[in-house]
Amino acid sequence: MFPVAFCISFCNFANDKNNKNMESSKKNNNPTTPIIIAIDGFSSCGKSTMAKDLAREIGYVYVDTGAMYRTVTLYALRHKLFNADGSVKADELQKAMPGIHVSLKFNEKTGRPDAYLNGENVEGEIRGMEVSSHVSPIAAIPFVREAMVAQQQEMGRKKGIVMDGRDIGTTVFPQAELKIFVTASPQVRAQRRYDELKGKGQDADFNEILKNVKERDYIDSHREVSPLRKADDAIELDNSHMTIAEQKAWLMEQFRKAATK
Ligand code: DC
């Protein structure tokens, strides 16, 4: 069972955005029937930027599922729900779940949703190193995943959605009409993350980031519940040496093919 509070927040967001996006879909002259686009892949390979840009271009809802796991992680950090060895006090977290209200609200300025924890905008905080280095064990907990997946499926009920994560094409929407699996070398991804943090004026250490990227790859692809893996019918995209423009053109082509099938 997942906490009702979680569901209400996300469902409201999804319905709101779905209605808005159906309107914007018409404005964009996108005449195709709405589909579900699942974008999975390793951390820091540009999935979110790519998914957000695609959603904007075609007038779809964009959902960053990593933000959901990050928000739960922030709650756990603030409430000291990690043991000294980095493991999670799962029983305590499970008890706390009904009091954890997570929502996503569209930010007009950035053109993407911000994450909220119990009504507080935590978008900045969930992107820092502390959350990044604690999120994998949280995302590996079955009751956390169950709650997230249920909400994500509700968000995609009306289709017209671009969702990025690790298990979207395999678990959340195995029936998605378009599945993309993104990869890039750990060095390239660490460099991108480093540049992003520096760009925001945050402290960053390249070697620490590279270590974190590799650790997360390992945990994400070896956990028991919904490990990161390419769905059999997903199209692989290695964007290590691609420009944003090349990637965008490639993605639009895949969208056209899938939406007009
Ligand atoms: O995409 P990201 O780096 O913001 O994701 C944060 C963490 O959440 C990452 O360790 C993988 C996990 N995650 C997941 O397990 N399933 C998802 N659908 C999305 C993210």
Image (spheres, helix red, strand yellow):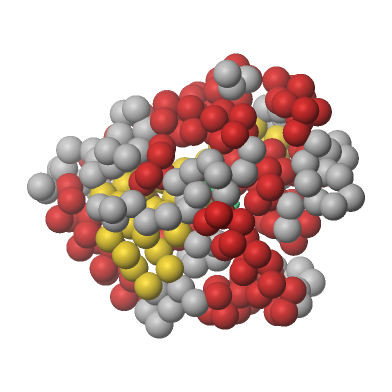
Q: Which residue does the image show at 81% across and 28% down from the upper left?
A: 92
Q: Quadrant of residue 148?
A: top right
The answer to whether residue 198 is above or below residue 154 is below
Q: Which residue does the image show at 62% across and 69% down from the upper left?
A: 214
Q: Which residue does the image show at 76% across and 69% down from the upper left?
A: 202
Q: Is residue 14 left or right of residue 211?
A: left
> Does residue 199 appear in this view?
no
Q: Is residue 227 left or right of residue 239?
A: right
Task: Classify the position of the N terminus by image quarter.
Answer: top right
Q: Which residue does the image show at 37% across and 79% down from the upper left?
A: 242
The answer to whether residue 213 is above or below residue 28 is below
The answer to whether residue 57 is above or below residue 90 is below
Please, which residue is most extreme toward the left here?
261
Tag count in the figure? 0
Q: Is residue 189 left or right of residue 41?
A: right
> Does residue 144 appear in this view?
yes
Percent coordinates x, y for residue 140 in the rendering:
62, 43
Q: Nearer the viewer, residue 49 or 110?
A: 49
Q: Nearer the viewer, residue 70 or 221?
A: 221
Q: Is residue 84 left or right of residue 167?
A: right
Percent coordinates x, y for residue 108 in the rendering:
52, 47
Q: Nearer the viewer, residue 255 or 42?
A: 42
Percent coordinates x, y for residue 142 in the rendering:
59, 34
Percent coordinates x, y for residue 151 in the rendering:
49, 29
